[in-house]
Amino acid sequence: MTDAQDWARLQTVALLGTDRRPLPELTGSPALAEAAAAVDGTDPACALLELAALATVRRRAGLLPAPAPRTAEPAPADPRPPLPAPAATRLRTLLAGRGGHPGAANLVELLPQWLAEVRRRGYRPPAALVPALLDTARSRSELRGDVVAVTGPLGRWLAEHNPEWRYVLRTVGAEGPTAPELIWQQGLFAERVTQLTRLRRTDPAAGLALLRSSWASERAEDRLLFLDALQDGLGPADEEFLEQALGDGSPGVRATAAELLSGLPGSALGARMAERALAAVTLAGAGSHLLVTPPSGCDEGMRRDGIAPSSPTGRGEQAWWLSEVLAATPLAAWCTAFALTPGQLLALPVLDAVDGSRRSTRPEEGGGWQAEVREAWARAAVRQRDVAWARALLGPVPRRARRVFEGAPARLLAVLPPAERAAWTAAFLRSHGLGDAFQLLGACAVPWTPPLSTAVVAALERAAGAGSYPWSHSGVLGLTERSLAPAAAPAVAALAADAAPDTAWAETFARLAGTLEFRAAMLAELSG
């Protein structure tokens, strides 16, 4: 009998009790058997413990030394320059979420700016702070790309030894041999979307091939978001795949494929939509106005091209069909067919072809065709990123705030160059204040230009003087803390000094000034 069998029999007696099982005989070796025979069996429980001690001593005495554990290879060298000492101290403050200024904003929200700037400048953080960075990104997935890039080889090395940081090995941008296929096959859904989006920006063909490789096995809701990622790097090579997606079983996938194709110059879908659009909207009266004859039905071809038979918003069917057709039509088709510029087309009255009025003849259709056509052209300008049409649709800042349709100005603004966006928004603030400015400010590049920053500070001053409360502008204030040019700190500090003591606006201005000073110091440390 072997030592293992002896030990198993001892365990059995210990589990069942000596009153139910007799003491075993230990026969693993003659010496062990002789020693076991000398054990006093008067008290079976004590005898069992003595036998277990004998067996344990024998097992340990005969144990051969195990091979020495393999020492882990050190982390690869990181050739990047070290983070300046003041910036390292600042990182500790950001990770703790507390600043030196008592009224400063939640500094955790400034960490993304700090990480992006460090990544851009190519600094290496102190090794002692890398674990804290990895922990922060574990709970904040939006930081992972920058954290993985900033922590570099050490971050990847640590992730290989700590399962809690394994997301680093699946995150796009990690240094090392992680292949796109590995992330695509093993990553979480968000990681796969990020991988596809990034690959499309660098190698659109490779991104499309990756999506094709698993398209048939993906869930419908996942196919929808994966398909949406193709808008990065969208080109003629994607048309065949998108045309196939028009036959997908999911209505959402079909609609997304149609939207992508409508933004692809020269696509067959765009040509089909243009044919429908030019039949529905014609130039009449020797070029004095446009006449609308909306589609009378949604045929099979229209449904295949992503147009739903009924509106999901409850609007009239003909208005819905017309809007969907016009939004998917290449904007160049209008200028070519009518030999007019975007501005000239937008200035034309839009009349109903049946009764010549500006309104539909059917009450269920709702408002005038002018608004329907303008809304559809605005959607087309956003899809096609057409600067000339976006500029014409926005026009100069109106004296009175008006909305062509919900959210249109902000989406059109995003099509314009950054400097033009900032100038238009600054003019809007000077005319209308902060009331409708949140989406417009969100469309502007960060940090805001000095003229835009000046306009925002002036609008805040007017809001405080008008007696409104800061929390009624909380969204704009949150954007301002992250986006206002740090050079505006003295102007904000002056507002804080001039505000009535112990008021909400005094506290708000002091907090904003402190945050701007913090951001200015944060960026100065990195620029040195």
Image (cartoon, rainbow, N blue to C red):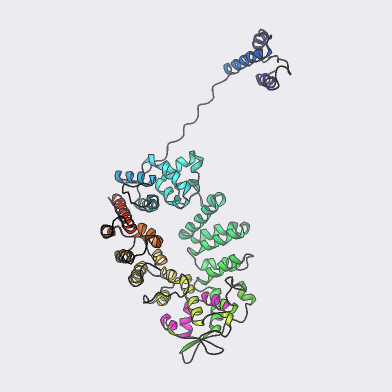
Q: Which residue lies at the image location 40% right of the left edge and 42% below the top edge?
A: 130
- Residue 370 place in picture, x, y as percent: 49, 82
Q: Is 340 a magenta residue?
A: yes
When the figure is inspected, residue 409 is found, relative to residue 498, above or below; the finding is below
How many numbered marks, from 0 up? 0
Which residues fall within the magenta stretch? 321-346
Answer left or right for 281 relative to 88.
Answer: right
Q: Which residue lies at the image location 51% right of the left edge and 50% below the top edge?
A: 179
Answer left or right for 423 relative to 250.
Answer: left
Task: Specify the quadrant of the image occupied by residue 55.
Answer: top right
Front-lying residue, 215 or 345? 345
Q: Is 90 a magenta residue?
A: no
* Secondary structure that dominates the magenta span: helix
- Residue 453 place in picture, x, y as percent: 31, 63
Q: Which residue lies at the image location 34% right of the left edge and 62% below the top edge?
A: 448
When the figure is inspected, residue 84 is found, relative to residue 396, above or below; the finding is above
Q: Looking at this view, name the residue that lies furthest to the bottom.
A: 286
